[in-house]
Amino acid sequence: MLRALAACNRATAPGLATPHWFAAACAAHGIPPSESGLVYEAPGLAQVRARLPESHGSGAQHTERAYVQGILPADDLLAMLPARRLLLLPYDWRRLAFADAWRAALARRLRTALGTDPDAWLRLAATVTASEAASEELTWAQLLHRAQSGAGPAASRGTPIGRERPRTPDEAIHLLKHGDHLWAWPEGTLLCLADAEVVDAVLPRLGPDGPWLLAAYLLRHDRTPRVVLDRLLADRDPDALRVLAAQSRWMQHSGAVHRLVDLDDPDVDVALLKHGAPEPVVQRIVARSRPGTGRPSPGARVLADWRADGSPWPAGGPVWLCSAEPDLVEELLRRQGARLGLAHQLLGCLRLLEHGGADRLARLAAGDVLGRSATTVCAKALACADPAAVLRARLDRETAPQKLVRKLRRARHAAHARDLVASLPPGEPVDWAALEAAHAEEPLPYWEDIVSLDGVPEDVTLRHVALLPEPGPDGLPGGARLSRERARHGLGGHPHCSPTTQLDGLLMAGILDGTDLVPRAAPAAWLLAYLGAAARRTDAPPQAAEARTAVAGLVRAGLGTDEAAWARAAARLAGLDPEWDPLSPVEALLTAGAVRP
């Protein structure tokens, strides 16, 4: 047991130090306390503060470990790190916990020091701009003190921070298109940390460019600042909405793109379609587009643009085949009919019949623009009393789940499997019951990728929740229930955020609570390490303390003074119990004699 624990990485040692009890136990048995043979001593706070993190991830690990293990308090980051690093956050820092803690600590300090006084916030922004123009490399603590005292160099508008910021919405869109976040704007940095009352007071004082600049600035955040987004959506500034819609891809991880669709704004809808919005977003826009509403519908505008630019497909692509826009449906069938699969052609013909009439469908079918099979089905349908029923019946045959299952069994790779599911005609539902039954009979290849697609019903996803990706700090897009159930199958391995940020976020968002954590979340070893480190951190969520209290109760009840129970729990944590599933929650770990409930 001692040898197994001695092999652990120093970064995981509590407080970055070898516990005295462990060192004494190793000495008593003649076992080296670490792979290096050394007893680790925790670095002092002065030592940590003296070595600033570098921009690349490996050069910032000493700061990361000191923060995560509670040696470096979050508030100390305000007096340690140059403010410029937050204005132009190094890319690698976005996955480190101390960077999130630094931003949160600054938000708390600004709330306390500046309140809701817009003049104070603008004065601080001007102070930051002037200091950066003078290349002073001051910390946020120093800049706040200077702004409140009125000292410091005069503001210089001629020297940009980083790359020169965009001068027009189109320039901002161009920079975002290329992933260029190398321009700074102190006002944007501060507003993305501010409460709603501050944003409401400051934004009108930034002039006509303020809204679209703020829209462009917030898109550099992995976690979209909700307060700022709420204000921009409420104001409906056309340029700001155009920037958000044109580069909405930067909000996909946070699930904020659907907030733009909720506006039901034709200009926003068309911009989203033109710039490659995700399929669920396109389907929402297409489904509500109707002609004859007194204003040009998104479908009518897309059709006009398509006719003018001569591109192969309209904005939104073949999804328009399931729309109530007969002109656009007919144009799609005329220009692309022979290139579409039979099911897509039949769907378009059905929609043209429903929204354009039988005569219009007859003229199209006689125009030699459809495939031979589609033309034959249309002729047969139009000769019947209920042509829609004939088209629907043949469409149902073409989209029968058995056909999709056969194709999925031959999928060559994960992307191919996802494309096969997406190849169904737009608006036609996937028969998930049939797919699940086929998978139960004989596993479908790349099932994990299939059930992780957007639009899978929640009940299906819950039955296969272990296959979903880990929730981020704001949870999975499908909602809190999915995130809670997914936590049973392991946390701490999210690719885009640190484990500490992940669990802090899930707790603070109420997706997990302190008592929920102990019986539900896994793995136990990592969760115990998180809770131990959280006890030393000054900014840990209060729910972590609740979880520690619950663990203490389980230790008393499940282990008590039973040496065999303690030995069993220790063997499980050290990986020495071959019958123990490491992806188990803390409660199972501490339950005497149980392998896993």
Image (cartoon, helix red, strand yellow):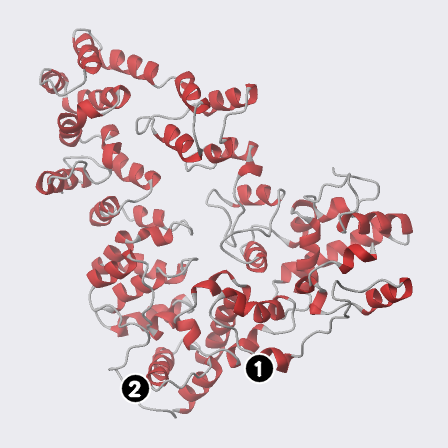
Quarter of image, res 427? top left
Out of 312 and 36, give the one closest to the viewer: 36
Q: Is residue 202 left or right of residue 511?
A: left
Percent x, y of residue 271: 22, 48
Tell me if residue 241 comes above or below residue 408 in the rendering. below
The residue carrying mark 1 is 50
Quarter of image, res 44? bottom right
Tell me if residue 255 comes above or below residue 112 in the rendering. above
Q: Residues within 10 Å of mark 1 (few under 14, many from 20)?
A: few
Out of 113 and 525, give the one closest to the viewer: 525
Residue 393 is labelled as none
C-alpha span from label 2 to label 1 = 30 Å
The residue carrying mark 2 is 155
Residue at 33%, 85% in the rendered image: 130
Q: Kindly indicate whether the residue at mark 1 contacts the one at mark 2 (C-beta within 8 angstroms).
A: no
Tell me if residue 279 comes above or below residue 225 in the rendering. above
Q: Is residue 419 left or right of residue 265?
A: right
Percent x, y of residue 186: 35, 75
Determine the secondary structure under disc 2. Answer: loop
Determine the secondary structure under disc 1. Answer: helix
Tell me the quadrant of the picture where the N terminus can be found. bottom right
Percent x, y of residue 349: 20, 20
Q: Amino acid at mark 2?
A: Ala
Q: Amino acid at mark 1?
A: Ala
**Number of on-image labels:** 2
Quarter of image, res 367? top left
